[in-house]
Image: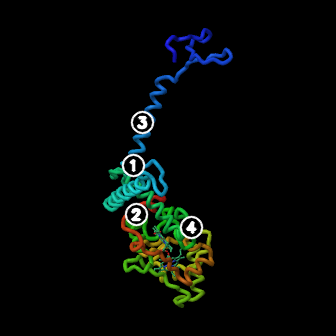
């Protein structure tokens, strides 16, 4: 750069003095702020390479003074998650859901409820949907858990007991009651079972013919579990026979088969396969499906 500055007349900019066939080169250096930023990035990159993993070597790489690794970061995140979970798992066990589900105002940490629902949903998908269907909608012989019809009870505590010990399961404290195979075991004759089928059909459908003989047989053989009017009993897990909802089907043939062979739906107990807090999460989830009491 020469000291006696020569200015290009047309643009008013200093020229460098280089000239080709009458064309002169203008002197327009990088702005200072731009150079400043570039120098800063150079300094930054040197610092970065010293502190962080940076330069690839043949079989490894420079580790940097901070010893940072992405794998280490994932490990910490997972540890943090497990810690957060165990805090919530503990809270699941100490929260009185029987009370909280009746009166949500009693819940002091709504996150516990959200955690229970999320965990319950995923556990339900893994363990229960094979039998109870997607979202617990049920199949023949496998009750729908979305409605407010319950064999054994739909309060939080009752649901928790069902899941913990099962129904007709191998656990000593399992819910238990056995409807006899009235036909197969020759407790009743085929004629009697036919009259009883007519009677059961007429319980939920008033257009069906009444069977006085069936009513008498019902009073003698069935009311101890199903109740005097056939309204069912949760004490024995005996379904209401007066509604139009059937666990095993409401056609004449299906009802006849039920009375002839009896029914013993089996629900496994989960207290050895799932932890106590997981069972709480599942109970909250099942309760929230729609029929919780
Ligand atoms: C092997 C099939 C099977 C699996 C798996 C299963 N259940 Fe069941 N469950 C049943 C049957 C069958 C019944 C009905 C028993 C009866 O007839 O009394 C039942 C009944 C229930 C009831 C009682 C419903 C009522 O009306 O009182 C609840 C609650 C329940 N199951 C929840 C669950 C949950 C939660 C899981 C997953 C941890 C699960 N079940 C897994 C077969 C199963
Ligand atoms: C020891 C108690 C008990 C007695 C007695 C009993 N039942 Fe049942 N009954 C049950 C139980 C429990 C179930 C549900 C079985 C299951 O969930 O697997 C049931 C189911 C039924 C069902 C199927 C309902 C549905 O929704 O699909 C019919 C129908 C029925 N019983 C009719 C009768 C008749 C008729 C008698 C008398 C001859 C009778 N029961 C006697 C306990 C009993």
Give the Cα separation between the discs numbered 1 and 3: 16 Å
- Which of disc 3 and disc 1 is earlier in sequence? 3
Residue, disc 3: 43
Question: Which numbered dot is residue 244?
Answer: 4
In this view of the protein, which residue sits in the foreground, 224 or 260? 260
Task: Please state the horizontal and vertical placement of residue 115, each as a whole percent of the image.
Answer: 41, 56
Task: Please state the horizontal and vertical placement of residue 165, each as a whole percent of the image.
Answer: 40, 74
Residue, disc 2: 155
| Relative horizontal placement of residue 165, taking residue 4 as reference (left or right) | left
Give the Cα separation between the discs numbered 4 and 2: 23 Å
Give the Cα separation between the discs numbered 1 and 2: 58 Å
Task: Please state the horizontal and vertical placement of residue 233, each as a whole percent of the image.
Answer: 44, 72
Residue, disc 1: 64
Q: Residue at x 34, y 52 (%)?
A: 107
Give the Cα separation between the discs numbered 3 and 2: 66 Å
Question: Which residue ends up furthest to the bottom in the rendered image?
Answer: 186
Question: Which numbered dot is residue 135?
Answer: none
- Which of disc 2 and disc 1 is earlier in sequence? 1
């Amino acid at each position: 750069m020469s000291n006696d500055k020569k200015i290009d007349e047309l643009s008013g900019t200093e020229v460098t003095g280089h000239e080709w066939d009458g064309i002169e080169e203008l002197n327009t250096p990088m702005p200072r702020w731009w150079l400043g930023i570039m120098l800063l990035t150079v300094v930054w990159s040197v610092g970065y390479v010293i502190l962080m993993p940076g330069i690839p070597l043949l079989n490894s790489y420079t580790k940097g003074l901070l010893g940072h690794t992405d794998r280490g970061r994932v490990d910490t995140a997972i540890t943090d998650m497990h810690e957060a979970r165990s805090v919530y798992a503990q809270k699941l066990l100490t929260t009185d859901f029987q009370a909280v589900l009746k009166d949500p105002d009693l819940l002091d940490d709504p996150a516990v409820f959200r955690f229970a629902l999320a965990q319950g949903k995923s556990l339900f998908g893994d363990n229960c949907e094979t039998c109870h269907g997607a979202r617990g909608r049920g199949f023949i012989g496998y009750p729908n858990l979305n409605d407010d019809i319950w064999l054994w009870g739909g309060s939080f505590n009752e649901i928790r007991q069902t899941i913990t010990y099962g129904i007709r399961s191998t656990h000593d404290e399992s819910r238990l009651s056995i409807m006899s195979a009235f036909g197969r075991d020759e407790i009743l004759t085929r004629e009697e079972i036919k009259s009883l089928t007519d009677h059961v059909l007429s319980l939920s459908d008033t257009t069906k013919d009444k069977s006085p003989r069936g009513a008498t047989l019902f009073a003698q053989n069935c009311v101890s579990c199903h109740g005097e009017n056939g309204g069912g009993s949760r004490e024995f897990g005996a379904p209401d026979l007066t509604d139009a909802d059937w666990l095993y089907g409401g056609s004449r043939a299906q009802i006849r088969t039920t009375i002839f062979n009896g029914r013993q739906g089996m629900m496994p107990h989960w207290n050895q396969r799932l932890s106590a807090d997981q069972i709480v999460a599942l109970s909250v989830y099942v309760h929230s499906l729609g029929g919780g009491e």
